[in-house]
Image (cartoon, helix red, strand yellow):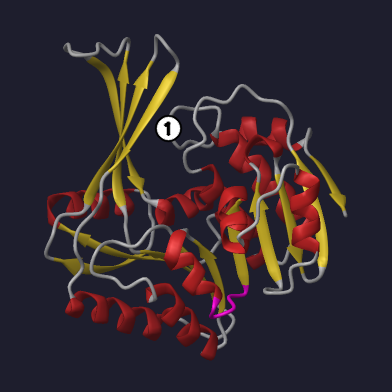
């Protein structure tokens, strides 16, 4: 079973404009609403693998929370919801068709009470079994301490679960103290963790090779692919050139597909290529979206080398 912890979900609204009229009235010709927040984006690729056992654990509240629960039910996404008093946030993506720009506006989110936090933790602890994967993904809403992920990782790993962290800032740095099974970060997040400044990808590779803090580390490099250190072996994935529109959620989709492949006992090389093809295909659209025709075409052009 894969458990995805979604402490700060959102309703993602993509609003399409022919032209963004500064200081004027901009009229939308289309709007699209999706389950959002890093946690829900992690499981986006799972709809293509109906045999995968997964569940999302989320705080949801207010009319937006009810709407997100309806969207999850409509998409047959298993969820364990901790009800909260305050309203779940909305995040907006404003697409200016004329300029080909996407503007992301991420709201702060609700404040989680002490009792809501405790209820969430109790439910998660009861759900997780030995050998389950538990993914901690995204920012923390107000009310949750920066140690929230770290403390849960310790509890989950005591039960024999494999914990994965994909966050940033203090929540991420504290999580590393618990030595999670896998760390997934982008280039800037990794360098911030290590308090390093480098000029080239080769320098990051050297840094990763010499990193003994954790057994499994994956660093995504945007359009340049990714590098990974898994069970002592290092890999580099190189992507083909594509016409990207918006990379929002691509790192989350990468992580979800990677863990789905691990859960299916696929080889590491296969898992990395599949994850990369799903993530890159998502970049072809203004909003998070996966088309298997895109995935298969990109997969054939990806290269992987063991370093």
The answer to whether residue 65 is left or right of residue 163 is left
For residue 223, what is the image quadrant?
top right
Query: What range of the chain is rendered magenta?
Result: 177-181
Residue shown at 70%/42% (left/top)?
225
Number of numbered labels in the structure image: 1
Residue 174 belongs to the span the image colors magenta: no
Where does the image place residue 8, in percent across and percent down from the top left?
A: 32, 58
Q: Quadrant of residue 193?
A: bottom right
Overall secondary structure of the magenta stretch?
Answer: loop
Q: Residue at x 38, y 85 (%)?
A: 126
Front in this rendered view, residue 285 or 26: 26
Q: Is residue 16 visible?
A: yes
Relative height, residue 19 to residue 79 (above, below): above
Q: Which residue position holds label 1? A: 287
Residue 173 horizontal/vertical position (percent):
50, 68
Image-based side of 201 in relation to 96, left or right: right
Q: Residues within 10 Å of mark 1 (few under 14, many from 20)?
A: many
> On the picture, is 215 further left or further right than 111?
right
Relative vertical location of residue 81 with respect to residue 279 in this rendering, above or below = below
Q: Nearer the viewer, residue 154 or 197?
A: 197
Q: Nearer the viewer, residue 204 or 51?
A: 204
Residue at 66% x, 25% y: name it.
242
* Element at label 1: loop
Q: How far across and down, in percent of the image, does residue 103 sit?
A: 36, 28
**136 with respect to 272 (left or right):** left
Give whichever of 145, 138 is nearer the camera.
Answer: 145
User: Which residue is drawn at the image coordinates 25% and 81% (left, top)?
Assistant: 118
What is the quadrant of the C terminus in the image? Answer: bottom right
């Amino acid at each position: 079973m894969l458990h995805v912890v979604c402490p700060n979900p959102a309703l993602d609204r993509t609003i399409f404009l022919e032209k963004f009229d500064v200081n004027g009235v901009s009229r939308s010709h289309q709007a699209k609403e999706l389950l959002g927040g890093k946690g829900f984006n992690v499981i986006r690729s799972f709809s293509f693998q109906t045999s995968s056992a997964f569940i999302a654990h989320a705080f949801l509240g207010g009319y937006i929370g009810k709407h997100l629960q309806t969207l999850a039910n409509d998409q047959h996404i298993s969820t364990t919801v901790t009800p909260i008093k305050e309203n779940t946030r909305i995040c907006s993506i404003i697409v200016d068709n004329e300029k080909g720009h996407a503007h992301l506006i991420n709201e702060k989110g609700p404040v989680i009470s002490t009792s809501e936090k405790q209820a969430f933790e109790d439910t998660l602890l009861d759900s997780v079994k030995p050998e389950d994967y538990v993914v901690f993904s995204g920012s923390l809403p107000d009310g949750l301490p920066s140690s929230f992920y770290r403390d849960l990782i310790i509890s989950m790993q005591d039960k024999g679960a494999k914990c994965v962290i994909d966050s940033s800032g203090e929540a991420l740095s504290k999580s590393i103290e618990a030595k999670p099974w896998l760390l997934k970060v982008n280039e800037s997040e990794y360098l911030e963790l290590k308090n390093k400044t480098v000029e080239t990808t080769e320098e990051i590779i050297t840094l990763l090779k010499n990193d003994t803090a954790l057994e499994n580390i994956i660093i995504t490099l945007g359009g340049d692919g990714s590098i990974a250190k898994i069970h002592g072996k290092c890999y580099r994935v190189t992507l083909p050139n594509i016409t990207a529109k918006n990379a929002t959620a691509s790192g989350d989709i990468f992580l979800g597909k990677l863990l789905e492949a691990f859960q299916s006992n696929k080889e590491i090389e296969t898992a990395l290529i599949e994850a990369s093809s799903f993530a890159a295909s998502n970049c072809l659209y203004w909003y998070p979206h996966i088309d298997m025709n895109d995935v298969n075409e990109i997969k054939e052009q990806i290269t992987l080398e063991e370093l």
